[in-house]
Structures are given as structure tokens and as C-alpha cells.
Amino acid sequence: MRLVHIYQFKFNEFFQSYTALFFEKIWGMVCKNQVSSTKLNEKLIQAVIRYLSEMAAFPDLGEFYKQNMMSLFTILIVPNISITDDDIEEYETEPETYVKNDLEESDTETRRR
């Protein structure tokens, strides 16, 4: 995901012919719920959200985003800002560690920030 992002936004002149293909693949991954809301996927989810948010600036995709805004929120955004079963389990078993980790990550890119 990071490589696609780098090529798309740093080397756009070389990657432009692949933009639609990669956007479709990433959007398909999101729609098929292949990116689950777990701690293991936090960085991937953050990268997908960042990529999709930066792609929203492309005029060609404006209509696509208008038509798919509800899907974007219901499939990707809301599940990843909600508390997960992993969060609840960590809070119940080690509340001090949960609070410490949550506070330490407050200035970094995590799924709930």
C-alpha cells in the first residue's frame, strides 16, 4: 500500500497509466471487506484511508466519491474508529497497559486518530 502511495503521489508522471487500475484494486479490497478491523491491520487501514483521502483530490474521481460516500463510511471509516473486540479484551485483562498504549499512540497515526 505504501509503495502504491509513493508511486502515485511522488512519481505520478510514471505511474499515471496505472492509477485507475490500482484505485480499483484498492477500492475492491475495501468493498470486499478484506481489510478487517484488528490491531494487526491498523497500519494497513491507515494507509488505505490516507490513500483514498488523497485520491479524493483527483477531479476524475469526484463523482465516484459522491456515489460511494456512504459505502466508504460504513465499510471503512466507522468500523475503524469504533472500539474493537481486541480493544475490549486488552482493557479487561490489562487496563493499565491499554490506557498507557492508548495515550502513547495519541500523537501517531492509528486507526482511531
Image (tube, rainbow, N blue to C red):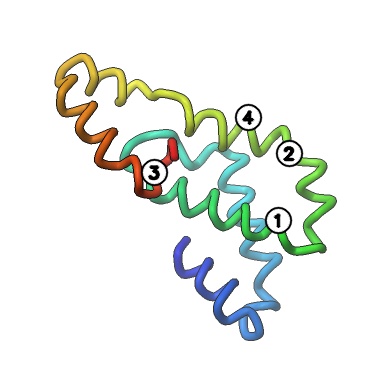
Of labels 4 and 1, earlier in sequence is: 1
The quarter holding residue 16 reads: bottom right
Report, in whole angstroms, how far the alpha carbon at label 4 lies from the one at label 1.
17 Å
Of labels 2 and 3, earlier in sequence is: 2
With 18 as the anchor, is 85 left or right in this view? left
Q: Which residue is mark 2?
A: 69
Q: How busy is the neighbourhood of tag 3: few (under 14 within 10 Å), some, or many (20 plus)? A: some
Residue, far top = 92
Report, in whole angstroms, how far the alpha carbon at label 2 lies from the one at label 4.
9 Å
With 67 as the anchor, is 90 left or right in this view? left
Q: How busy is the neighbourhood of tag 4: few (under 14 within 10 Å), some, or many (20 plus)? A: few
Q: Which residue is mark 3?
A: 110
Give the x, y percent position of residue 52. 61, 53
Q: Can you tell which mark lies on residue 56?
A: 1
Q: Can you tell which mark lies on residue 74?
A: 4
Q: How busy is the neighbourhood of tag 2: few (under 14 within 10 Å), some, or many (20 plus)? A: few
Select label 2 or label 3 by which is in front. Answer: 3
Amino acid of disc 2:
Met
Report, in whole angstroms, how far the alpha carbon at label 4 lies from the one at label 3.
18 Å
Report, in whole angstroms, how far the alpha carbon at label 2 lies from the one at label 3.
22 Å
Where is 113 relative to 63, above or below?
Answer: above
Proximity of marks 4 and 1: CB atoms separated by less than 8 Å: no
Where is 85 relative to 107, above or below?
Answer: above
Task: Name the secondary structure under disc 1.
Answer: loop
Amino acid of disc 3:
Thr
Of labels 4 and 3, earlier in sequence is: 4
Amino acid of disc 4:
Thr
Proximity of marks 3 and 1: CB atoms separated by less than 8 Å: no
Report, in whole angstroms, how far the alpha carbon at label 3 lies from the one at label 1.
20 Å
Task: Name the secondary structure under disc 2.
Answer: helix
